[in-house]
Image: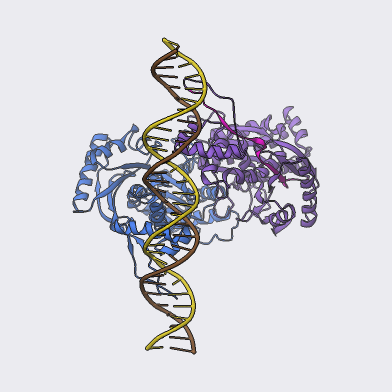
Chain colours: A blue, B purple, C yellow, D brown
Amino acid sequence: MLSTGHYLILSSLSRNGPESRSELALRLGMSKAAVSSLVRDLLKQEILCEQTPVHGSGRPSVPLAVRAEAAWFIGISLQDDPAIVVLTDLHGTVHDRMELPRHADLETCVSSLCDAITHLRKGLRSAKVSGVGTALPGFVANDRQTCLACAALGWRDVDIGGVLSKRTGLPTWIENDANALILGEQLFGALRSSPDFSVIFISNGIGCANIVNGRLLRGYAGGAGEMSHAPIVTDMAHALPCRCGNRGCLETVASLLAIGNAARRAGLPGEIAELARLAAGAHPEALSILHHAGASMGLATAHLIQLIDPSHVVVMLDPNLRDGIYGHALQRETESHILRRPVSRGMIQFRDFEPDSFACGAASLAARYFIFGPDGV
Amino acid sequence: MLSTGHYLILSSLSRNGPESRSELALRLGMSKAAVSSLVRDLLKQEILCEQTPVHGSGRPSVPLAVRAEAAWFIGISLQDDPAIVVLTDLHGTVHDRMELPRHADLETCVSSLCDAITHLRKGLRSAKVSGVGTALPGFVANDRQTCLACAALGWRDVDIGGVLSKRTGLPTWIENDANALILGEQLFGALRSSPDFSVIFISNGIGCANIVNGRLLRGYAGGAGEMSHAPIVTDMAHALPCRCGNRGCLETVASLLAIGNAARRAGLPGEIAELARLAAGAHPEALSILHHAGASMGLATAHLIQLIDPSHVVVMLDPNLRDGIYGHALQRETESHILRRPVSRGMIQFRDFEPDSFACGAASLAARYFIFGPDGV
DNA sequence: TCAACATAGTTCATAATATGAACTATTGAC
DNA sequence: GTCAATAGTTCATATTATGAACTATGTTGA
């Protein structure tokens, strides 16, 4: 069994990359003796490995790294149809993946997922899977087992975690899609050493999550990061009704769904690629729709930056949007509404929308337990 | 010297109120034996005291409480002129206070503050002061000693913490005014057991701070909670220029200064009390100005609630504003733009604007060190 | 080529801290 | 007045980190 000390070492190496025992002792404020003994255990269990020594003056230091093959995880994304199931290692690398129809019926859903998991586990031969994570577009209870509400699947109080756990015999965690995404980014991504960053994804809906003080910002009722219903269109003459009951929410203008609707109302094609092509050809109405959508997104992003002050905002979206007027308006509008900061270069990082990111983030939920331990951050 | 265990006990009692040894053991997940021994030390040092036993079935339990007189603190507010200096006990109760002119010159400022501190210390006779905290309207460095920038005082990189510490011989902490306010609320206030709440104050400027996951939300560059420059007026025809260089910031419409300016532009008196009286008498222009200001404040508050999801938002403002159309519009606009939550009753708590709150919050910075220890939360 | 030096990492006796189990203490209930 | 129930203490022990002395392994430069 691993102790708190072991998990300290593991999480430090995961967050900060390979370091020698001496560097670890310095960073963690522990004695060299303690680190030495903890590392010995982790090496014996083949969770860590020693890398090639680094030469300086004096005895070379031996960087220690987390072994990717030390543990394997299943990540499930129900963010969209089809559902995606991935098998990742302890570095978050995807080794195998499957797509399957996303069923709203719990029994059918779990059965097909379990079949996929069984298939993926067979590919591992002797190695064992340590846990399962699931990302879904909805609210999740505090125990991270039960889905409280999911509009896309029509779920209310569905204990998908419990059922998956019983059927697979593996520990299971459930998480909101945006949260899973940012938790994956925090554990495996380039921003892993940053304690304050945000992730936004623009799909049919808009999702947002924030890491603050090194931890996920959940809020009192688990509703933090609710960007999609930010009151952006305040001119009530133009505010469209939103499914939430209010008017003028961000998602009524800036989501893919909203853009498609606006295009069709204007007699234009509703597909993003088509619309982007028209805009690139200077079609005035296409330009107007995409500019309005991007600028609205930028305004909401400015609110986020002003209130939460992240070091980076990762924006995941369709490349057609990113490279056209939408992305441009988003960036411009954001930057024109935030206070000048010394480091605002590259604060907004665009990234292609990859459905696998959600599954990968889901897998990281289980990996997190392996790396941070039972009472981990 | 106190150990981590001692501080755990102290901070739990401070946060959750008096509890018996058994309750503490349960809450902290420690053994009764450990709690027993730690509590014995704290009783011997007269930091804790035993309250009258509570009878149930079985041996009565003895609630333990933090002794208010166990430590004393100085709190300084440079939030406004005059500066305020208070002497508080370990419960945050103000036992003495002084007002003095706020000097922009560092030497004069510190000298007059030190005179006041000396005077307050004399009133304590044998008891000793444990630390000094200062709240000021500006940015503070990470070491909580240096003021990086303060427009009101014209300061840049002023090491007021170091100077105060040297002159008083007491450990000193500096903090932004809004941050000091919420940290005081967290340590001493009614919301102390809530890990997610926000505080907004409306004065000549607008300040905001947030507690998230039980910790102050500082953000990457220490700029989190920057509500006053939220881009609220998006209709550029009506957006007023702001001192920050942008247009349409919240503080150009909702702050006392902005309201006064708007009133004077309309040929009305700039004093809030006067304006509020006119509005109460249904004066159309007064009503319009205050409604617009309050609604803008409400819109910004809705953004905050959607993004950060606090359990409560404490709004400190002039009673004349609170009881009139401003307060009404604020509340109404906020509630109409947030997703319905199960618990939204009393989410917004109005409170009178009390300048002493800043000084009290400042004192809490030092108290925090006493209660949470050197590497406390 | 080899001594001097510098840094990395280990060993081990010890200190600090928390634990479990058995103990005492103090009440209410019958 | 005895018993059940809960609070709190004691103490031997387990766990975990520490400091100081040690070994290991390289570079540097005369």
Left/right placement of residue B37 relative to residue B240 reads left
Instruction: Tell me residue A184's x, y (percent).
Output: 38, 51
Q: Is residue B330 visible?
A: yes
* Residue A249 horizontal side relative to residue B166, left or right: left
Q: Which residue is found at the position 38% from the left and 49% from the top?
A: A3
Q: Is residue B78 magenta?
A: yes
- Pick the residue in front: A70 or A31: A31
Q: Give the quarter of the image for residue B333.
A: top right
Classify residue B82 by image quadrant: top right
User: Measured along the vertical axis of the image, is residue A263 above or below residue A188?
Assistant: above
Quarter of the image where one finds residue B207: top right
Q: Position of residue B48 (x, y in %)?
A: 60, 36
| B14 is within the stretch colored magenta | no
The answer to whether residue A326 shows anywhere in this view is no
Residue A87, placed above or below residue D26: above
Coordinates of residue A89 in the picture (x, y in percent): 29, 55
The x, y position of residue A190, in whole percent, is 42, 59
Q: Nearer the viewer, residue A188 or A301?
A: A188
Magenta stretch: give its range: B59-81
Residue placed most toward the observer, B106 or B8:
B8
Q: How many marks are shown on the rendered structure? A: 0
